[in-house]
């Protein structure tokens, strides 16, 4: 999974540089994001996610990876066995994204594959460990805020490109989860970097 996102990140950054000269009213809508939240359900704990998003008209394509650390074992007190189950998920989503001035609202769903390692621990010693791999239907709803107008381009003197561009950051809230053998729902914050609208 690390290699996939390193490659995706390299392609994303290369794409931004190549398109830096053509960012006035013709820039693509493409941005990366990272989120942090709390998940509940069959998988519960702290949720971390990364995503790459590309928008064509109102259609939004997303590649995302999620990880949930099980911070809430099934047995909280006492010396008895505790059951820990983390989650690692990677998938693709398709949805719709609506932009107005400096904010956007998007809805997406798709197909993902989950890896759910489970460990049974007693007095700090792992007694049993196994994994569940299964398909899932991921979903997410995002509300983002970003710059309404273009800003100064620090690369324009170095690369001889436009003085202003639409590249910038975003912040927002996300409701996400999946429907699967072990479903969950999560809510958290998300931050992005890239081209969030056409300028």
Image (tube, helix red, strand yellow):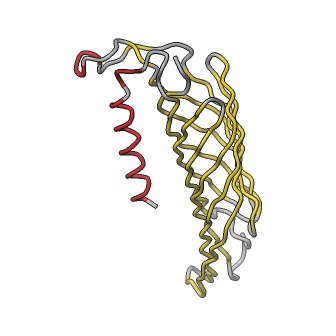
Please name the residue shown 65% across and 36% down the image.
59
Closer to the camera in the image, 60 or 172: 60
Q: Where residue 166 appears, x then y in whole percent?
A: 46, 20
Q: Nearer the viewer, residue 85 or 141?
A: 141
Identified at 29% across, 17% down, the residue is 156
At 41% across and 40% down in the image, what residue appears?
A: 12
**Percent coordinates x, y for residue 47 in the rendering:** 62, 53
143 to the left or right of 197:
right
Query: Which residue in the rendered view is the most extreme toward the left?
Result: 158
Q: Position of residue 139 (x, y in %)?
A: 71, 50
Most distant residue in the bottom direction: 127
Q: Quadrant of residue 3?
A: bottom left
Of 46 and 88, the residue lying toward us:
88
Percent across and percent down for residue 65 are 55, 54
Report whether 13 appears left or right of 78: left
Q: Quadrant of residue 167?
A: top left
Does 62 appear above or below 196?
Answer: below
Identity of the residue drawn at 71% across and 58% down: 137
Q: Is residue 75 above or below residue 154?
A: below
Left or right: where does residue 56 sit relative to residue 143? left
Displayed quadrant of residue 53: top right
């Amino acid at each position: 999974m690390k290699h996939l996102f390193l490659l995706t990140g390299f392609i994303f950054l290369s794409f931004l540089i190549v398109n830096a000269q053509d960012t006035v009213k013709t820039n693509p809508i493409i941005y990366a994001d990272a989120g942090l939240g709390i998940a509940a359900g069959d998988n519960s704990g702290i949720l971390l996610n990364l995503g790459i998003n590309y928008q064509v008209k109102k259609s939004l394509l997303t590649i995302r990876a999620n990880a949930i650390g099980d911070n809430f074992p099934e047995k909280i007190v006492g010396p008895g066995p505790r059951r820990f189950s983390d989650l690692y998920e990677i998938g693709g989503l398709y949805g719709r994204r609506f932009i107005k001035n400096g904010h956007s609202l998007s809805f997406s769903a798709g197909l993902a594959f989950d890896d759910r390692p489970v460990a049974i621990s007693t007095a700090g010693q792992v007694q049993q460990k196994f994994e569940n791999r299964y398909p899932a239907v991921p979903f997410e709803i995002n509300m983002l805020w970003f710059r309404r107008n273009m800003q100064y381009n620090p690369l324009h003197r170095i690369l001889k490109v436009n003085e202003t561009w639409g590249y910038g950051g975003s912040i927002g809230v996300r409701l996400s989860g999946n429907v699967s053998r072990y479903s969950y729902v999560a809510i958290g914050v998300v931050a992005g970097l890239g081209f969030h609208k056409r300028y």
